[in-house]
Amino acid sequence: MTKKLLIRSSFAVAICLVFGFMGAVATQSGLADYYDTLRKPWFEIPEDIFSPVWILMYALLGLAAGKVWSKGFYHKWVKTALLHFLFLLLLNGFWFVLFFALQMPFFALLVIAALFIVILFTIRWFKIINDQAAYLLIPYAIWILFAIALNFEIWRLNS
């Protein structure tokens, strides 16, 4: 791993973890008063597993972004890929706010569905620049598919 890749990947992981921390703050604001009172599907994951998985996902996202960024921000394709990535992070954070803090599971479902589409576009752009970076996003895409199913069922069971 080159020094440039290490620095940029570390910075990207830190940015992703900051977004994760903001999501955790939004989650805590609605966890006990809201989420715990909802009817949930049989496939709900225990809370003590949820946080470590999110941390792993944010680390993978950061590593992927670092690999793309290390190819040079001057390149139009790198800028486009990282712009998609930034939009991905914003939608991810907005989902936490809608679902937990604002307690709006239907609108959160719409946002997380849009997030999945943005993930697919981001994977496509990352693949143009670096195959490994694109592959690092696949576990996150699968995790978001699971979150979509969970969000949908919670909305359905509590509507």
Image (cartoon, helix red, strand yellow):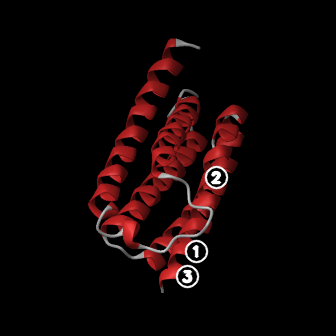
Q: Amino acid at mark 1?
A: Glu
Q: Distance of mark 1 from mark 2, alpha carbons? A: 19 Å
Q: Amino acid at mark 2?
A: Ala
Residue drawn at (31%, 64%), measured in percent from left and top?
30
Residue drawn at (58%, 74%), measured in percent from left and top?
153
Q: Nearer the viewer, mark 3 or mark 2?
A: 3
Q: Is residue 75 above or below residue 111?
A: above
- Most foreground residue, 14 or 105: 105
Q: Earlier in the sequence, mark 1 or mark 2?
A: 2
Q: Distance of mark 1 from mark 3, alpha carbons? A: 5 Å
Residue drawn at (35%, 57%), measured in percent from left and top?
27
- Most foreground residue, 31 or 121: 31
Element on which disc 1 rests: helix
Determine which of the numbered discs, if any, sits on residue 64 in the image.
none
The image shows residue 76 at horizontal and vertical percentages of 56, 43
The image shows residue 43 at horizontal and vertical percentages of 62, 62
Element on which disc 2 rests: helix
Instruction: Report the side of 42 relative to 82 (left or right).
Output: right
Quadrant placement of the N terminus = top right
The residue identified by callout 3 is: 156
Q: Farthest bottom residue?
A: 159
The residue identified by callout 1 is: 153
Instruction: Report the side of 48 relative to 43 (left or right).
Output: left
Determine which of the numbered discs, if any, sits on residue 141 in the image.
2
Residue drawn at (48%, 86%), measured in percent from left and top?
159
The image shows residue 89 at horizontal and vertical percentages of 45, 51
- Most foreground residue, 94 or 157: 157
Q: Marks 3 and 2: CB-CB under 8 Å?
A: no
Q: Is residue 19 above or below residue 40?
A: above
Q: Amino acid at mark 3?
A: Arg
Q: Distance of mark 3 from mark 2, alpha carbons? A: 22 Å
Q: Residues within 10 Å of mark 3 (few under 14, many from 20)?
A: some
